[in-house]
Each structure stands twice: as structure tokens, then as C-alpha cells.
Amino acid sequence: WIEVNQGALNENVDTLSRLAGNRSIFAVVKNNSYGLGLETAPSLIENHPKVEGFGVVKSDECYKLIKAGIKKPVMLLALPDNDTVEFDLIRQGIQLCVFTPDIQSRLESISKKLQRKIKVHAYVDTGMNRVGMPYFKAEEWLAGLAGSPSIDVVSTFTDLSEDSDFDREQVLRLNAVAGTVRKAGLSVGKLHAAS
């Protein structure tokens, strides 16, 4: 068995927040909270003031967190299973991580059906070449999302390589994309990056 210690988890949150300049964090609890229990770990740290929300990678994880009564925002870091699931997740308040060229039109259609703005996190690929809108294509794409009356860009983010020199380059790229869109008077939400 595994004992999950709430005090230890809260200390981890405190440490991560401190390392990030005392900022809030999105706790990634994918893959059964890395073995700590998908419903267990989030419920133990949800009330921590530095936990802004939770990130998962599977649609069913979103549903499990909803069923567990998690109230803070849940972000799906991957593509939903299909269009029907995408609509249902958005309807239930799940915040999508977006990175595909066609996402704006799909979200605007869903927004019209739900008659409300949709909260998203814009994922920019600054050089990892795994997931995200490539940074050299991201300015126009992000401006479209940020300028849409149907979409609320909560954050714009990237993931880092853990190579200190290249990480700095990735941060410069993210800031450049965000800066261009902000100069146009549009909000890109909070900026964040993590490995």
C-alpha cells in the first residue's frame, strides 16, 4: 500500500511555488497522480492557496476529477478523445489546452451552442517539437484566439527541455510571441513554462 501524506504534498506545493517566485501552480496529476491516486492527491491539496488548478492528459481523468468533487479548474493537456467528448468536457467546465490550427472555429461553434466564453490555455511549442503550435506560426494563431469574443485565453505556455541554455531561448521565444500579441491590445493570460 501507499500512504499519501497531506503535509508532504503541501510542502511540495510550497517548494514549487517558492522556486517559481512564490507564484501559483497548476498541479499536474496525470496518470493516477503519478501513483498517488487520481482522486486522492488533488483532494488533499485543492485547498492550498498556491494551487490554481489541476492538469491531466486523458479525458476520463477529467471526468474522475469532476466526480470526485474537485472545484478548482481542471486543464486537459492533450486532445479530447473525440468531438463529442470535447463538447461535453467544455460544457462541464474543463479548460482545454489548445494547439491545433482549427481550434478557433471549433471553439467558436461550441461557444455559440453553450452561449458562453470558453476558457483555454494556449500551448506554444518553443523548440521541444512534441506538442504545441510551433512558435514561428503562433503569433497569428494566438492573436486569433485572443481576439475571439468566444474564447478566454487563461494562459499561454510552453514546456522546457531542461537544458539551461536552450531553456533560456525557449523563454525568449514564448515572450516574443506573447509580446507581439499583447502589443495588438490582446490578452494572452498568464505566461508559464515547465519541464
Image (cartoon, helix red, strand yellow):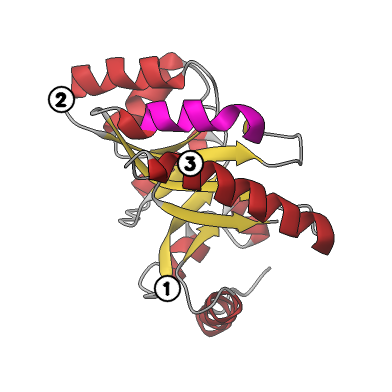
Task: Determine which of the numbered discs, if any, sits on residue 115 in the image.
Answer: 2
Rounded to the nearest whole Å, what is the CA distance between mark 2 and mark 3?
30 Å
User: Label 1 sits on what residue type?
Assistant: Lys
Residue under label 3, please give it: 180
Dot 3: element: helix
Of tags 3 and 1, the one toward the viewer is 3
- Report the span colored magenta: 134-145
Residue tagged 1: 50
Q: CA distance from mark 3 to mark 1?
A: 29 Å
Label number found at residue 110? none
Q: Marks 1/2: CA distance?
A: 31 Å
**Does the magenta segment cover residue 100?**
no
- In x, y percent, where is residue 7? 52, 84
Dot 1: what SS?
Answer: loop
Q: Residue furthest front?
A: 183
Residue 174: x and y in percent read: 60, 47
* Left or right: residue 52 compared with residue 14: left
